[in-house]
């Protein structure tokens, strides 16, 4: 059961979710979200490893391996918890459906936020029912090197400006509907690059936690 108020401050808790394929999870996921959490005052971030449907290009690691790596990455970090509802689904894991199930749990009034990187914001118009996302949650956006803050079309830029807020304090005053572009550390790391570096026998030491590196080696992943 998710809590809905921060009893010591008597203000609503912002429930924050961060979805990804996490093949593997890396510092480019963890560090910007930790910085975002500080800026916004998030007490907890729920990591949601995706179910990738059979007709889409499959992650190299199995769902169990991706989940194991997510658990290892956050086991000593109280900011993060892990939710497996998308992985348990047999149907496509549309973000909108996941958000609706969290909304039912937290109730109508509680602020709910979905965290994405700037690259995901750039392509958000390709997501299933994307225009409904802000009817359910706020969007918190982490910077990502190589992806502009300006959106690609005038229509998308207008949509962004209609919903964008400049101060995170507004996020706890409404349950959904805002977009906050956080200034987070720029880490030029991608899971694709990590998989390729592994295949080439190159070091990934600065790119992901040692526990994940050890797991990848022990499972002979990405070789
Ligand atoms: P891949 O290279 O396999 O596409 P990825 O590294 O982009 O993977 P995902 O699991 O697809 O990782 O990303 C999950 C979320 O994390 C997305 O919202 C994405 O925008 C964000 N993200 C991933 N890497 C970074 C990064 N270096 N900086 C900021 N956000 C990131």
Image (tube, rainbow, N blue to C red):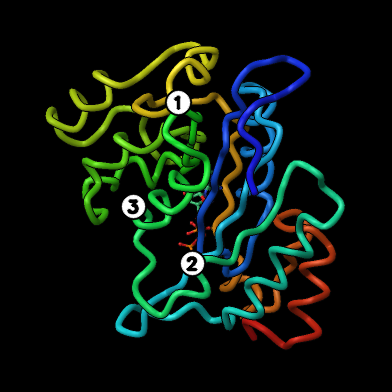
Q: Residue at x 72, y 47 (%)?
A: 80
Query: Where the C terminus falls, by quadrant?
Result: bottom right
Q: Residue at x 47, y 38 (%)?
A: 107
Q: Residue at x 57, y 37 (%)?
A: 15
Tell me if 111 is positioned left or right of 149 in this view.
right
Answer with the quarter of the image where residue 26 lies: bottom right
> Residue 211 appears at what percent x and percent y?
84, 66
- Using the numbered discs, state the Cα–Cα distance from disc 3 to disc 2 in whole angstroms: 11 Å
| Ligand 1 lies under 8 Å from the Cβ of mark 2 | no
Q: Are the residues flagged by discs 2 and 1 in contact, CB closer than 8 Å?
A: no
> Residue 81 appears at what percent x and percent y?
70, 52
Mark toward the viewer: 1 or 3: 3
- Using the numbered discs, state the Cα–Cα distance from disc 1 to disc 3 in whole angstroms: 20 Å
Mark 1 Cα shell of 10 Å, populated few (<14), some (14-19), many (≥20):
many
**SS assignment at label 1:** strand
- Using the numbered discs, state the Cα–Cα distance from disc 2 to disc 1 in whole angstroms: 26 Å
Is residue 198 shown above or below 126? below
> Residue 163 appears at what percent x and percent y?
30, 21
Tell me if 70 is positioned left or right of 174 in this view.
right
- Residue nearest the observer in this picture, 157 or 68: 68
Q: Which mark is residue 181?
A: 1
Q: Which mark is residue 96?
A: 3
Is residue 219 shown above or below 91? below
Mark 3 Cα shell of 10 Å, populated few (<14), some (14-19), many (≥20):
many
Q: Which mark is residue 86?
A: 2
**SS assignment at label 3:** helix
Answer with the quarter of the image where residue 149 lies: top left
Is residue 214 shown above or below 46? below
Mark 2 Cα shell of 10 Å, populated few (<14), some (14-19), many (≥20):
many
Mark toward the viewer: 2 or 1: 2
Q: Which of disc 1 and disc 2 is earlier in sequence?
A: 2
């Amino acid at each position: 059961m998710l809590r809905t108020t921060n009893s010591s401050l008597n203000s609503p808790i912002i429930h924050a979710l961060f979805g990804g394929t996490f093949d593997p999870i890396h510092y480019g996921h963890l560090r910007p979200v930790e910085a975002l959490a500080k800026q916004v005052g998030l007490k907890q971030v729920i990591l949601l490893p995706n179910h990738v449907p059979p007709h889409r290009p499959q992650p190299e690691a199995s769902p169990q391996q991706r989940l194991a790596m997510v658990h290892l990455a956050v086991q000593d970090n109280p900011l993060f918890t892990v939710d497996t509802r998308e992985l348990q689904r047999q149907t496509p894991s549309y973000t909108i459906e996941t958000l609706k199930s969290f909304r039912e749990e937290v109730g109508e009034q509680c602020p709910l936020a979905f965290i994405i990187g700037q690259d995901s914001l750039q392509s958000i118009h390709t997501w299933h029912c994307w225009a409904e996302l802000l009817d359910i949650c706020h969007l918190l956006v982490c910077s990502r090197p190589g992806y502009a803050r300006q959106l690609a079309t005038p229509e998308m830029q207008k949509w962004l400006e209609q919903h964008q807020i400049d101060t995170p304090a507004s996020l706890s005053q409404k349950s959904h509907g805002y977009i906050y572009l956080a200034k987070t550390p720029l880490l030029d790391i991608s899971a694709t690059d990590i998989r390729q570096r592994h295949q080439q026998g190159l070091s990934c030491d600065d790119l992901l936690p040692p526990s994940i590196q050890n797991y990848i080696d022990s499972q002979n992943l990405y070789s």
